[in-house]
């Protein structure tokens, strides 16, 4: 673990130990999802602490090397002091090479916490929406030789509408890919991370619709905000309201021909010439 010479990493280890201690207490945590989140957090803090300790050790070694005396100067000084002429002839003096001054080593700045760690954004990835009714959508991130990187330094957390992939200290760089506001919800527990020789694969588990099939995805994220649960329940309980909203939108955005057609259709519906089902709420539509 850490010692007093590495106070920053020591604090991180203490945080991780306290989380582990809480997880070991019987009955302290009832919900499995809360336990899973705490375990993930504890592992992430411990990885950050290990990385921070390596930085601190590297910094201490560099400083000690700079402050140590250069022993290569001692033989040169001794030779110069003893090279006194004993005859009238000028003594033969071997050329003396001045030892090169050791270059200074800049220690990497310590990272205080995972939230303040600097990441390089992963801008390129591939999205595979899959075939009709496929249970997953897939993300491919190409990173040469990522398969040789320690698995403990690769982490991905999932929610219903997002994922957060982080890679610590890969060739001296921290990488991150964060995506949210998915086109459809996913199942975080069923989503997985697979690490290959030169790429990372994210399998996002789809959620079945109320009709038992999987939603079809056109893109990973949606530019439109998702409907609130209250509105979804309202539309489900009152299908007519959803149809009315659709017709209003078509009328507002349509041309004169479209508006005339919708207006005639609604007039016939209101007069009972198109059957029942849309009568309620027609009087509320204003054009």
Image: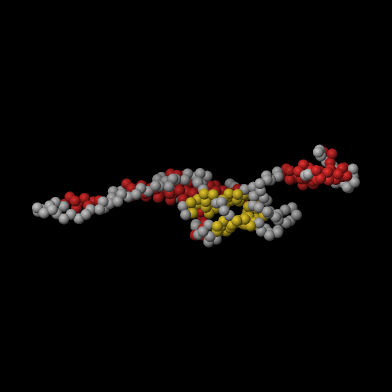
The answer to which of 246 and 72 lies nearer the viewer is: 246
> Residue at (44%, 45%) from the top-left corner?
109
Using residue 1 as the reference point, say whether residue 162 is left or right of it: right
> Residue at (41%, 45%) from the top-left corner?
4
The answer to which of 221 and 155 lies nearer the viewer is: 221
Q: Is residue 149 above or below residue 286?
A: below
Whether residue 220 is visible here, answered yes or no, is yes
> Residue at (47%, 54%) from the top-left corner?
171
Using residue 244 as the reference point, say whether residue 38 is left or right of it: left
Whether residue 202 is visible here, answered yes or no, is no
Using residue 89 as the reference point, say whether residue 94 is left or right of it: right
Name the spot of residue 99 as percent of width and height, x first. 27, 51
Name the spot of residue 117 as percent of width and height, x first. 50, 46
Residue found at the very far bottom of the displayed protein: 197
Using residue 2 as the reference point, say whether residue 25 is left or right of it: right
Residue found at the very far front of the displayed protein: 256
In the figure, residue 93 lies in which quadrant? bottom left
Name the spot of residue 275 as percent of width and height, x first. 88, 47
Name the spot of residue 182 as percent of width and height, x first. 65, 49
């Amino acid at each position: 673990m850490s010692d007093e010479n590495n106070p920053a990493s020591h604090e991180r280890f203490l945080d991780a130990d306290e989380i582990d201690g809480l997880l070991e207490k019987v009955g302290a945590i009832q919900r499995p999802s809360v336990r899973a989140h705490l375990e993930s957090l504890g592992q992430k803090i411990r990885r950050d602490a290990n990385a921070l300790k390596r930085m601190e050790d590297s910094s201490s070694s560099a400083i000690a090397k700079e402050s140590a005396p250069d022993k290569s100067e001692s033989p040169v000084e001794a030779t110069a002091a003893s090279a006194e002429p004993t005859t009238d002839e000028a003594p033969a003096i071997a050329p003396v090479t001045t030892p090169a001054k050791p270059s200074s080593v800049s220690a990497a700045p310590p990272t205080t916490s995972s939230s303040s760690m600097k990441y390089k954004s992963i801008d390129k990835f591939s999205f595979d929406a899959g075939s009709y009714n496929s249970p997953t959508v897939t993300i491919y991130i190409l990173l040469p030789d990522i398969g040789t990187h320690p698995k403990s330094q690769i982490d991905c957390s999932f929610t219903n509408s997002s994922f957060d992939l982080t890679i610590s200290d890969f060739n001296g760089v921290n990488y991150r890919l964060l995506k949210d506001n998915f086109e459809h919800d996913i199942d975080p527990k069923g989503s997985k991370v697979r690490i290959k020789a030169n790429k990372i694969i994210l399998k996002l588990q789809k959620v079945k619709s109320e009709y038992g099939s999987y939603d079809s995805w056109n893109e990973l994220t949606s530019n439109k905000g998702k409907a609130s649960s209250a509105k979804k329940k309202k539309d489900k309980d009152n299908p007519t309201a959803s149809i009315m909203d659709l017709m209003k939108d078509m009328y507002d955005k349509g041309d004169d021909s479209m508006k005339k057609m919708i207006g005639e259709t609604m007039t016939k519906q209101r007069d009972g010439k198109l059957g029942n089902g849309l009568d309620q709420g027609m009087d509320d539509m204003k054009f």
